[in-house]
Structure formats: structure tokens, C-alpha cells
């Protein structure tokens, strides 16, 4: 049980560290943002508190030191500086190291000691404790208060903000929304202190709030919400109900209820008598003792606690959390099983249709519908927003630009775009290489930029957006752009491009992804060895994605990655050549046209088809795969869009659309070009999944080498 | 549309909200409503649908309502309440169905669910 709790803590702390990093990087841009400072402090506080609870004493004591510094920041005794952010980012890395260190093994404290020494230097001098770094480990662990334990309680909060709260830049509604985020809240704004217009100071806050909050987060979490305003505001927090009080209610049934239960009074008679008397609240208002607003606020509290108690008593077992944590392996297993089910279902459909039994066909169709829903739901579970990855790159840009003496800002958009978990993980390396290249080779040194009339601060944009069943990831910089002539010269020198061949800009730029290709005059520790972009290409192709490069000399470069939403199951076009089936990813397929023997004859061996007046080159797959059976009278050209160009793939028959469950070909066939995997069809046969981009490239290279020889 | 007011034949003063009812123009707005209530028994606000509103806007409305009730004037709005104002009422916990003693013990026309 404890092991599970520790694993959960590790996971949660990992998420908090990611949030911490994002907040710190944002704080660098807006150092006065109180919400951000608040977020940083709370992340630290939670890491520390939970760390101590689960035996991560080293993390608790180290984080306590960093938290102390941020406590000074939130109290206005220190300001956010670059040095502070540097050290806090390093602290985040050190906590991550401590978090992942094997349990029971000695950890290296030197980095932590260094960070703490640095942080202590930043503290205002009178409060600087004169301790040596060796004493760092002896910091007292914070005590975890009992109310941090997961016990659901209801709190009555009266929040009376300082009159200048809005002018100081704090929005009280944000604080109330933060409280709402802690649990279930009922909020009543009190207007009785708002004066008439002749006395109103419109910029001041004349409103105060009564909030009834049911949460398991404890009083500290509530106080943390008001962490930056508590000195100036009047905040009262009282416990009014707790799940521990379930059997200790002091109230008892009302007199009328007892009489009805005893049979001495009928419910109708009781109602009649009750109608005659006014409600207590009405009497209070009528007598002018309490304002209607205050009565309403008290009624809200009464109603809230009643409903909380009712829920607790009626269905304690239904108090499950809104979300649960599931190990990623279990999800992978689920997807594999769904994949198997899709295959079996295809077999079932085939058999039922062949049998012709209408009842059997109806059942098979029902199973097909359910399988499709199950497939979509299962795939959706693995979808994660790509934003978590973006924050890593902000850090990368920050660190690398500092190392290279450049000033670079990163802007991101589309962080909420969702992609399959596996795809996100595999995108990391390609994105690192592209961004490193942008920073090292793309963005110029500040003085060069200024001389070129640009801002000294370079920009790298990273964004994601949906495009059909794919996601487009764009990495754009406003640097020097690619040197077309240098790339061309290098490509000719390396034999990648025949001399005197005219090729488009796009084709020239795509050469930067060739293995070992680099035009860099010198190799730095960031890039220049010509390895990175090759990794990018392999990585993206491994994801069945494609890369587009666009560049304007002097203005910058844009690299666009088109990535499929998921790697597990794809929509595809099933085709047949001879007795063999092949699968073409449907995302790239544009249309299918017929190819007659006369068309072939008319093209004089050049493999060009006339499609509504446009010339489309085609690849006869029969020849490429060495299939010797006789081709039909009329073949089919499947026309696909590959990197913006139309290319046809000639097959015997187009069977139709197909849900393809992708199976890996295994290590033995990993390097086979033009084939990205295989799938099992309904009848149990195997069909190869063709990677059209790679197939085209392979054939082009073969043709080039033939011409060369 | 700028913040301004106009007078109808029946003496009602209509104040156009402009595109924001926030801390930046709260003082101007308060002044215009105050002047309107001093010169007419019937004052109404005409909101822009894309109104930006913050908590100062809400308390200004409440303050104006109290002032109008004290003077025996009517203070209301024309047309539909803009979505941003409705959202702010809900987010701030201002929505209520209790009677308001400043509104002749009637339900508040602004925050009482009339919208």
C-alpha cells in the first residue's frame, strides 16, 4: 500500500515539477504576476508537505529552503530576479533528481547545498542565517498539520477584501474561483456595505463574500488561496462540518415530525398550521434585525451542509474521485486488446456476409458498431494535451540561449491540442533537435540581428493545431533562414544532387535531413555535426508523419511536422496486387483513377498519367514488389499527396476503406524502406502497410543511382 | 460606442454602456449615472452585447440601484443583459432571489434572476 502511495507521490510530484517549471518560465516574462508567484509557492508547498508524509525527507527539507525564499517573495520582502529564477529552476532539477533517486541509496547533496547557499545569499541580510552549507541537511522538517489529511470538511469562509484590492491588481473573483477549485463551493456576494453613488469610491471594493466550501484539502490549502492578500484582508475560516461528525449531529427531529410519526397529527394538518406562521428568516427581516442578504447567505450555508450530509449518508461509496490514475501499461494493454478485437470483428463481418444469414449479419453489424465505439473511446483515453511537452522546450530555449549568448524568447500556441500519449513521447527528440538547430544556426547573435534591422531578441514559435486526423506542429524562428546555395553546393559535393539539376526550394531544403548533412562551419556542443536533423527525419517517419520546410533568407525558417493523431489504429485504403493485399494510409490518399493498358502505352514508359489535364507521375507497385502474375486489363492509380506533390501508386484493385490495426514488423525488418508495418486482415492474411513518402524517396534514389551509373 | 447618455421625450435618460464597465471607467460611469438620477426619475442602461465587465461594474450597478431607490427613481436596463454581465453575476456569487429592501422589498431586477 505504501509503495503505491509512494508511486502516486512520485507521479504527482513529477506533474507539480512540470507546473513549477512552466510557472517559473512565465514568471521570468512577468515577474510581478502574483498568480504565478502563488502557483510557484503552492507547488513547492505541496511537494514539501506530501514529500514529508511519504518519507521523502531529503526532498521535504530541500524544498522547505526554496519555499522559504518564495515566502519572502510573496510577502513583498524580495523581488523576482533572474538569479532567483536560475536558482529555483536548478532547485526544480535537483528535486527531480531526488525524486528519481533509488529509495535507500545515498544521494548527492552537493548540488542542493550549492543551490541553498546561493538562495541564502539572495535573502535580505538581517534575516540571513549564518549557517554553513553542511548544516543544510539538519533543517527541521515542517510539521504536517492534521487538517492536511484527506478528510472532507465543510468550511465557512468570510472574505472581506481590502478596499484597495482591485487597484492593487488582485481580482477577488480569481481568489473565489481558486476556492471553487478546491472542492464544492457556494458563494454569496454581500452588497450591504456598498454605499450610494454620492459616497461610492468606484475603484474600491465595497463587496465582501461568504463562501461555504466542502473540500478534503484542509485549512492550509484554503489559506494558501489568500496567501498574498491575507495581511490586508479580513479572512475568517471556520469549520462547520466534517465527515468525522457523521454520528455526532446534535439536532433532532422537529416537533411536528415527531407528532406526525406518532400519528397524533396528519401531514396535511401540520402543513396547514405551518402555513400560518412566518419563517424565522422572514421574521428577522421583517423586524429589521438581520438584512435579507445575510439571511440568504445563512440559508445557502444551511442548504449546502444539508446536501453534503445527505450525500455522505446516502451514498458514501459513490464518493469516488472524478478522475483516477491508471498506469500507462494498462492503457497500452487495453489498446492492444481493442486492436485484436477490431481484427476479430473484421473476420466476423466477413464470415457473416459470406454466410448470408440475416440474423447473424445483424448481430455482426451490432458488434461492429460497438467495436468502433470501444475503439474510439479507448484511443481517446490516451489523448493528452501537448502543452506539457512545450514547457520543457521553453526551458531548453532559456538555457541554450544563455549558453550561446543570444537573447531568445519562445512563444507557444495550441498547447491544448491533444495527441496520443505515445506520439507525444516520441516527438520529444525530434523537437529538441529542431529547436536546438533554430537556436544555434537560425537565430543570429544580437549584434548581427541589430545590424540587419531586426530586434536583438530572437523569437522561436512552437505551436500545434489539428488538421483532419493529423496534428500540425510548427516550429518557426525569425533567424537568418536557410542558405539555399550553401545547401545545394554541399549536396552536390556529397553526391546527393547531380550537378546542373534544377530542383525546387522545398526539395533543396529537405536535403538538410540527409544523414550527416551539415553546412555548419564549426561544430558546437549544441549542433553542427549533421546528426540532429537525420534523427528528426527518422523520428517523424517512425511516427508515420511528414516534414515540410519553408525558409526565407534573412527572415527565418518554418518547419512543419504533420503527425497522425494515433499510432495504434489508422483509417486506410485496402488494395490488392495479384494475390497480395496492401494498406495505404487514407490521410494522404486523394483519389483513385483507372489506368488502362492504352494509357500505359500512350505514356511511352514514362509512367505519367493524365488526370483531368494534370500530369501525375505514378509508381507501378507490381513491378516494385516483383509480383509476376498477370495484371488486369484495367488497373487503379491511387493518387496521394506527398509533401505537396501528387504521386500515383498503381494497384490491381482498390478493395475499400479499412480500419487498420498496426503491427510492428519487428527488428529484422526495421530497415525495410517503404513499409511501415503490417496488419492482419479479417481472413487472417497479412497485409503490408506502405509508407508512401519513404517508398517514393527510395524509388527516386534508385532512379538517380541508375542514371548516375 | 462611447459611454454617453441621451434623454427621451418621456424624460427617461438612457445611458449607453460603451464596451466596458470596468475599473478604468468606473468613475466616469458613476458620475454619469449620478447626474442622470439627479435630473430624471427614470434612468436605464443600454448595454453593448460585447461588454467587458469586472467586479467594480457590479458594485456600481448595486450602488446606483440603492441611490435610485432612495430618490424614488427607477433604475433599470433596456434590452438583453449582456452575457459577460450574467457570467460575472454568477461568478461573483451576486445572483440572489431574496428581496432587496432598497428595491421596495422586491426581487432585485439586476441580480434576482430577471435576466
Image (cartoon, coloured by chain):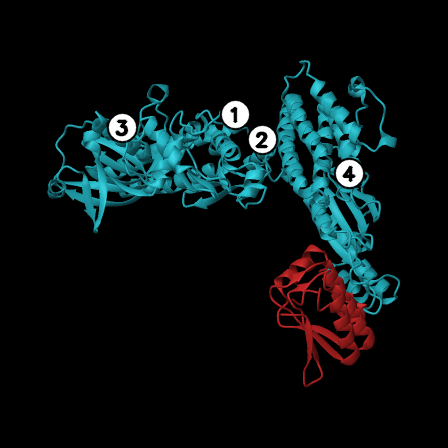
Q: Does A36 sit left or right of A537 as displayed?
A: right
Q: Residue at the bottom extreme?
A: B9
- Indicate the colour of chain A: cyan
Q: Residues within 10 Å of mark 4 (few under 14, many from 20)?
A: many
Residue A12 rendering spot, x and y as whole percentages: 64, 31
Instruction: Mark yes or no: residue A16 visible.
Output: yes
Q: Label 1: which residue?
A: A524
Do the residues at pointers 4 and 2 share their chain? yes
Q: Nearer the N terminus, badge 1 or badge 2?
A: 2
Q: CA distance from mark 4 to mark 3?
A: 66 Å
Q: Are marks 1 and 2 in contact (CB under 8 Å)?
A: yes
Do the residues at pointers 4 and 3 share their chain? yes
Q: Nearer the N terminus, badge 4 or badge 2?
A: 4
Q: Quadrant of residue A706?
A: top left
Q: Are marks 4 and 3 in contact (CB under 8 Å)?
A: no
| Mark 1 residue element | loop
Q: Nearer the N terminus, badge 4 or badge 1?
A: 4
Q: Label 3: which residue?
A: A685
Q: Label 2: which residue?
A: A404
The mark closer to the camera, 4 or 3, is 4
- Indicate the colour of chain B: red
Q: Are marks 3 and 2 in contact (CB under 8 Å)?
A: no
Q: Label 4: which residue?
A: A73
The mark closer to the camera, 4 or 1, is 1
Residue A356 rendering spot, x and y as whole percentages: 24, 40
| Mark 3 residue element | loop
Residue A249 rendering spot, x and y as whole percentages: 80, 43
Q: Which mark is residue A24?
A: none
Q: Does A388 sit left or right of B68 as displayed?
A: left
Q: What is the chain identity of the residue bearing mark 4?
A: A
Amino acid at each position: 500500500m505504501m509503495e503505491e502511495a509512494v508511486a502516486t507521490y512520485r507521479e504527482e510530484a513529477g506533474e507539480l515539477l512540470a507546473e513549477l517549471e512552466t510557472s517559473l518560465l512565465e514568471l521570468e516574462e512577468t515577474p510581478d504576476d502574483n498568480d504565478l508567484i502563488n502557483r510557484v509557492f503552492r507547488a513547492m508547498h505541496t511537494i514539501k508537505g506530501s514529500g514529508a508524509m511519504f518519507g521523502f525527507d531529503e526532498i521535504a527539507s530541500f524544498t522547505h529552503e526554496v519555499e522559504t525564499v518564495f515566502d519572502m517573495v510573496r510577502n513583498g520582502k524580495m523581488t523576482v530576479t533572474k538569479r532567483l529564477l536560475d536558482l529555483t529552476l536548478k532547485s526544480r532539477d535537483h528535486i527531480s533528481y531526488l525524486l528519481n533517486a533509488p529509495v535507500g541509496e545515498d544521494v548527492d547533496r552537493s548540488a542542493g547545498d550549492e543551490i541553498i547557499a546561493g538562495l541564502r545569499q539572495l535573502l535580505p541580510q538581517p534575516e540571513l542565517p549564518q549557517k554553513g552549507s553542511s548544516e543544510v541537511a539538519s533543517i527541521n522538517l515542517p510539521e504536517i498539520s492534521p487538517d492536511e489529511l484527506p478528510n472532507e470538511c465543510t468550511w465557512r469562509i468570510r472574505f472581506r477584501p481590502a478596499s484597495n484590492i482591485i487597484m492593487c491588481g488582485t481580482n477577488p473573483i480569481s481568489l473565489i474561483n481558486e476556492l471553487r477549485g478546491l472542492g464544492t463551493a457556494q458563494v454569496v456576494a454581500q452588497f450591504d456595505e456598498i454605499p450610494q453613488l454620492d459616497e461610492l469610491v468606484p475603484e474600491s471594493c465595497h463587496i465582501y463574500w461568504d463562501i461555504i466550501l466542502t473540500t478534503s484539502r484542509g485549512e492550509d490549502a484554503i489559506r494558501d488561496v489568500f496567501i498574498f492578500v491575507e495581511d490586508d484582508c479580513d479572512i475568517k475560516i471556520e469549520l462547520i462540518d466534517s465527515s468525522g461528525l457523521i454520528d455526532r449531529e446534535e439536532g433532532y427531529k422537529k416537533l411536528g415530525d415527531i407528532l406526525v410519526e406518532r400519528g397524533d397529527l396528519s401531514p396535511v394538518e401540520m402543513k396547514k398550521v405551518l402555513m400560518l406562521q412566518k419563517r424565522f428568516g422572514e421574521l428577522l427581516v421583517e423586524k429589521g434585525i438581520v438584512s435579507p442578504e445575510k439571511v440568504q447567505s445563512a440559508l445557502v450555508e444551511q442548504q449546502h451542509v444539508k446536501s453534503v450530509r445527505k450525500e455522505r449518508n446516502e451514498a458514501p461509496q459513490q464518493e469516488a474521485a472524478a478522475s483516477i490514475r491508471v498506469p500507462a501499461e494498462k492503457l497500452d494493454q487495453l489498446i492492444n486488446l481493442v486492436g485484436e478485437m477490431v481484427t476479430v470483428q473484421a473476420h466476423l463481418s466477413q464470415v457473416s456476409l459470406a454466410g448470408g444469414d440475416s440474423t447473424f449479419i445483424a448481430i455482426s453489424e451490432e458488434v461492429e458498431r460497438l467495436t468502433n465505439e470501444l475503439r474510439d473511446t479507448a484511443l481517446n483515453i490516451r489523448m493528452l494535451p501537448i502543452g506539457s511537452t512545450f514547457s520543457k522546450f521553453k526551458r531548453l530555449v532559456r538555457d541554450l540561449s544563455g549558453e550561446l549568448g543570444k537573447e531568445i524568447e519562445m512563444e507557444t500556441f495550441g498547447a491544448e491540442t491533444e495527441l496520443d500519449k505515445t506520439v507525444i513521447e516520441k516527438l520529444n527528440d525530434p523537437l529538441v533537435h529542431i529547436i536546438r538547430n533554430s537556436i544555434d544556426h537560425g537565430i543570429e547573435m544580437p549584434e548581427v540581428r541589430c545590424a540587419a534591422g531586426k530586434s536583438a531578441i530572437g523569437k522561436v514559435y512552437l505551436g500545434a493545431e489539428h488538421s483532419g486526423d493529423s496534428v500540425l506542429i510548427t516550429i518557426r524562428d525569425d533567424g537568418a533562414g536557410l542558405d539555399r546555395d550553401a545547401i545545394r553546393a554541399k549536396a552536390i559535393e556529397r553526391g546527393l544532387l547531380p550537378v546542373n539539376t534544377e530542383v525546387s526550394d522545398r526539395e533543396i531544403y529537405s536535403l538538410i535531413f540527409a544523414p550527416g548533412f551539415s553546412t555548419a562551419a564549426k561544430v558546437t556542443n549544441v549542433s553542427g555535426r549533421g546528426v540532429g536533423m537525420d534523427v528528426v527525419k527518422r523520428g517523424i517517419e517512425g511516427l508515420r508523419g511528414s516534414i515540410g520546410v519553408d525558409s526565407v533568407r534573412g527572415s527565418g525558417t518554418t518547419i512543419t511536422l504533420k503527425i497522425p493523431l494515433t499510432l495504434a489504429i489508422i483509417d486506410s485504403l485496402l488494395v490488392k496486387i495479384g494475390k497480395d493485399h496492401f494498406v495505404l494510409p487514407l490521410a494522404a490518399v486523394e483519389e483513385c483513377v483507372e489506368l488502362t493498358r492504352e494509357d500505359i502505352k500512350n505514356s511511352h514508359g514514362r509512367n505519367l498519367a493524365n488526370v483531368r489535364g494534370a500530369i501525375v507521375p505514378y509508381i507501378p507497385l507490381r513491378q516494385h514488389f516483383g509480383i509476376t502474375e498477370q495484371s488486369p486489363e484495367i488497373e487503379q492509380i491511387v493518387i496521394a499527396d506527398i509533401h505537396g506533390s501528387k504521386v500515383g501508386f498503381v494497384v490491381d484493385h482498390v478493395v475499400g476503406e479499412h480500419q487498420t490495426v498496426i503491427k510492428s514488423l519487428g527488428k529484422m525488418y526495421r530497415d525495410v524502406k517503404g513499409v511501415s508495418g503490417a496488419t492482419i486482415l479479417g481472413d487472417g492474411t497479412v497485409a503490408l502497410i506502405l509508407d508512401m513518402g519513404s517508398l517514393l524517396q527510395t524509388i527516386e534514389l534508385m532512379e538517380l543511382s541508375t542514371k548516375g551509373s | 460606442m462611447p459611454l454617453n447618455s441621451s434623454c427621451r421625450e418621456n424624460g427617461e435618460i438612457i445611458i449607453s454602456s460603451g464596451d466596458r464597465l470596468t475599473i478604468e471607467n468606473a468613475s466616469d460611469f458613476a458620475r454619469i449615472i449620478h447626474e442622470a438620477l439627479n435630473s430624471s426619475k427614470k434612468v436605464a442602461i443600454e448595454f453593448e452585447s460585447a461588454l467587458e465587465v469586472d467586479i467594480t461594474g457590479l458594485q456600481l450597478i448595486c450602488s446606483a440601484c440603492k441611490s435610485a431607490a432612495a430618490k424614488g427613481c427607477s433604475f433599470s436596463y433596456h434590452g438583453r443583459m449582456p452575457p459577460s454581465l450574467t457570467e460575472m453575476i454568477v461568478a461573483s456569487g451576486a445572483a440572489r432571489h431574496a428581496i432587496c429592501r432598497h428595491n421596495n422589498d422586491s426581487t432585485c431586477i439586476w441580480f434576482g434572476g430577471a435576466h
